[in-house]
Amino acid sequence: MAAKEFDIPKLPTYIEIPELNPGVMDGDGPFKSVEEFQKPLGFPGEKIDNWQEVAIAKMGELKSKYRSVQVFLDSCVKCGACTDKCHYFLGSSDPKNMPVARQDLFRSVYRRHFTFAGKYFPKLVGAKELDDNMLDDWYNYFHQCSQCRRCSVFCPYGIDTAEISMAAREILDTVGVGQKYCNQILGKALTVGNNLGLPEPALRDTLLDLEEEVEEDFGAPVKYPLDQKGAEILLITPSADFFAEPHIDGLIGYGKVFYQDGVSWTMSSYASEGANFGMFIGSYDIMRKAALRIRKAALDLEVSRVMVGECGHAWRVAYSFWNTLSGVGAGAQSSDEYAMKLQKQLDDRYPQPQHIIEYTYDLIQRGKLEFDKSENDDRTVTFHDSCNVARATNMGGVEGGQFILPREVIKAVCNNYVDMERSTIKESTFCCGGGGGLLTDDLMEIRVKGAMPRMQALKEVEKNEGVNTLAAICAICKSQFSKVLPKFDFDPYMIVSVHQLVSAAIILDKPQTDAEEPAIEAEETAETE
């Protein structure tokens, strides 16, 4: 199928509310899933005959199960505070991409079936039926939401469109109208252990090749162990780290940090994936199934710490949900014997789970790592706050730690660092445009248009500060930027992992060579005499 042609948005001097262009992003949405990918997740293979009845019943279940959903649906007063906060609306100009309008696709059906006024006076309150046209709008526009939650930061009531998007997607899956990209990936993660479907032999060979490459390039025997029972740390990282630029350079950096600290660590072939797309489709049950693979790996390998690599939503799921999903951290039910077993096994002197940035930052603070910052002097670096990290997690146990720690790590290894404009970073950060399960080529138009606000802020620091490097700690952000940067006349290779910068600057202890040992022995003999 030929790629759809579309206009690349021009980068404005300032971000302004665009002139409305109704229906410009209407369409069929992303590729639909098929039975092959639906059935393993427990969803119908195609749209069921009584889909309307099942959809409304599921909506009723979700509003009761997740009370926040009902609160969000009931509390909106259409104040307009969210209107210009969505990067997809700013980039596309389609009014249905305003957060309030996207919510109303769901809210209008909710009002029709779950409110008194909607049942008896539907036109007065904007209540609508869930017919085929509405279902198409749901599928189209709820896959133009990356669940970044920027709108919730500015909403005076804290309404979170992400939760409504997740609920809509779960209903769509329940009636057999799922998205191919997310559901295919979930099937691989739940059966093979990672999003790529990379089996253990291929993963092991990849890591062995990486060890050889790193030792040849840097002269130190840095290891990338797999399934090492009894290691202290289990690293759960996005599978992109195993094969693609710039992700693999971040993995190289993790290994160097572990090597220099002298700690034992391992990855797991059974649970080699940190990303959890169950969150994107709104399914708690599937999200838990993915998390339980990590619990099993931790128990089987008898590790005492669980650490998460550079992946935004992996860290969000780990930080916010692993405790109740699997028992990594406190919070699981006492009747869950495996959660209790894991909590006893993990070392409570450390955060459980811990982000790799927290770990590296702590080593830097304790003076355990040395750097030659001049190795990054060809770079002027800025940092992209990934939305799931910025608006749904913390690091280091300090207020704003998720903003502070990554920047401090970058500054420890780079001499040249600047921030983008204040209203576009930290808790107000713009999304990369490819999160929330949208990182698929059949959604390239909305990905490019959604990236426009971030690209505008980046262009300003490129022009005024000479920025030539964009660092991020999210695999989706890095993959997205690699594709969209050239669309806006940036170098696609300017996107890097934070631990790629660490890798370039870290000074490693080199093993003694055979030629050095006799000299040392001679010195010791002379001192004895």
Image: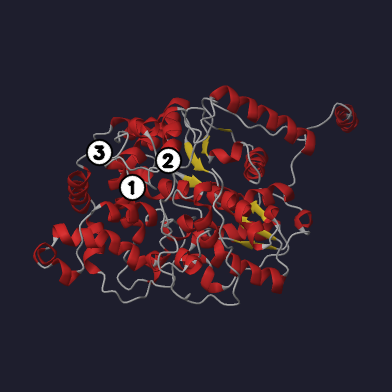
The total of numbered circles placed on residues is 3
Of residue 116 and residue 243, the one placed in the foreground of this image is 116
Quarter holding the C terminus is top right
Q: Amino acid at mark 2?
A: Lys
Task: Tell me what residue is drawn at x 37 percent, y 55 percent.
Answer: 142
Q: In the rendered image of this protein, does residue 310 appear above or below residue 71?
A: above
Q: Are marks 3 and 1 in contact (CB under 8 Å)?
A: no
Q: Are marks 3 and 2 in contact (CB under 8 Å)?
A: no
Eye-nearest disc, 2 or 1: 2
Q: Amino acid at mark 1?
A: Gly
Q: Is residue 380 left or right of residue 400?
A: right
Task: Tell me what residue is drawn at x 78 percent, y 37 percent.
Answer: 217
Residue 10, given in percent of the width and then of the height, sits at: 60, 69
Q: Amino acid at mark 3?
A: Ile
Residue 180, given in percent of the width and then of the height, sits at: 42, 40
Q: Dot 1 corresponds to which residue?
A: 282
Label 3: how many residues lie within 10 Å, few (<14), some (14-19) or many (20+)? Answer: few
Q: Dot 2 corresponds to which residue?
A: 180
Q: Earlier in the sequence, mark 3 or mark 2?
A: 3
Q: Is residue 314 visible to us here?
A: yes
Q: Are marks 2 and 1 in contact (CB under 8 Å)?
A: no
Q: Earlier in the sequence, mark 2 or mark 1?
A: 2
Eye-nearest disc, 3 or 2: 3
Q: Dot 3 corresponds to which residue?
A: 48
Work out how far the residue at label 3 is from the one at label 2, CA to CA, in angstroms.
17 Å
Q: Is residue 434 left or right of residue 361?
A: left
Residue 145, given in percent of the width and then of the height, sits at: 41, 57
